[in-house]
Amino acid sequence: MRLATYGASLSAAYAASPTTSVGVGLASALHRFSFSGSGGIASLDPWSEVDVGTLSLPLRIGIDRQWSLALIPSYQLARAEKAPRRDAARYGSVAALTYAAGPRQFIGFGASYYTGLDDDTVFPIVLVDWAIDERWRLANPLSAGPTGPAGLELVYGRGDGWEFGVGSAYRSLRFRLPAASAAAPGGTGTVSGVVGFLRAQYHVTPQITLSAFVGADFAGQIEVNAAGGRTLYSEDVGTSPMLALSLSGRF
């Protein structure tokens, strides 16, 4: 299996105080799959494109000058081509208790819960943005949400608009299949694995960034589920290459 992902996101935030803020985020991604081989799930040609759109409302509530509560409710539509939007929703929230040791030293621990697409999921969550020195920091490369935790990334900032990182995250993408699906009419597909990647990012402006990711999905697994959630097929896919481009704006 090969996977190429193209995505864009837009977010805005308002800080009522140094420890209290509210925001909104919109993200869209197109996942293009290519299956090879004549056996197993590949022989079913289960899907080729999956569209994912996510709305999130990050909220940070200050407890005191260092401690705060982070809530990130989100709503996601994930569907293969020709699957109806009305049956493609997942929703839930991240909740974490966070601690700020300094201006660039932030860490938090919590959990997430999401329901929909005939399944309920719970993930442990680590939120971090910790400056090691002027150029190196440890951070979350992704947003925690319906597709999994935020992961961890070691980042090097060159100071001239360029940033480079190496990281890893667990991802689990679940989506609705169309009624005409040969694999599971009206059911769901799930693609999961541990993603390892290298990232290069350029700040086009202080608000807009362009990022390129190259990596691989390790210990990948594909599941095809009947409507209602019963597993019909499950297959390990080993290691798959990954390429992703992302354009992000913050206002």
Image (cartoon, grey):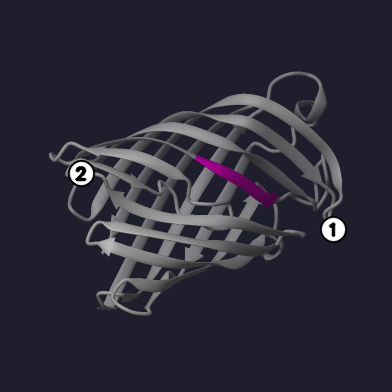
Image coordinates for residue 224, horizontal then vertical, percent = 78, 42
Image coordinates for residue 104, horizontal then vertical, percent = 24, 56
Q: Disc 1 designates what residue?
A: 228
Amino acid of disc 2: Asp
User: Residue 133's mark?
Assistant: 2
Compare residues 180 and 156 and report the one nearer the observer: 156
Amino acid of disc 1: Gly
Does residue 214 appear to the left or right of 134 in the view shown?
A: right
User: Residue 116's mark?
Assistant: none
Q: Secondary structure at mark 1?
A: loop
Q: Residue at x 25, y 44 (%)?
A: 132
| Image quarter in which the C terminus is found | bottom left
Number of marks in the rendered image: 2
Q: CA distance from mark 2 to mark 1?
A: 50 Å
Q: Which residues are magenta?
A: 169-175
Quick one: which residue is furthest to the left in this view? 160
Q: Residue at x 17, y 44 (%)?
A: 134
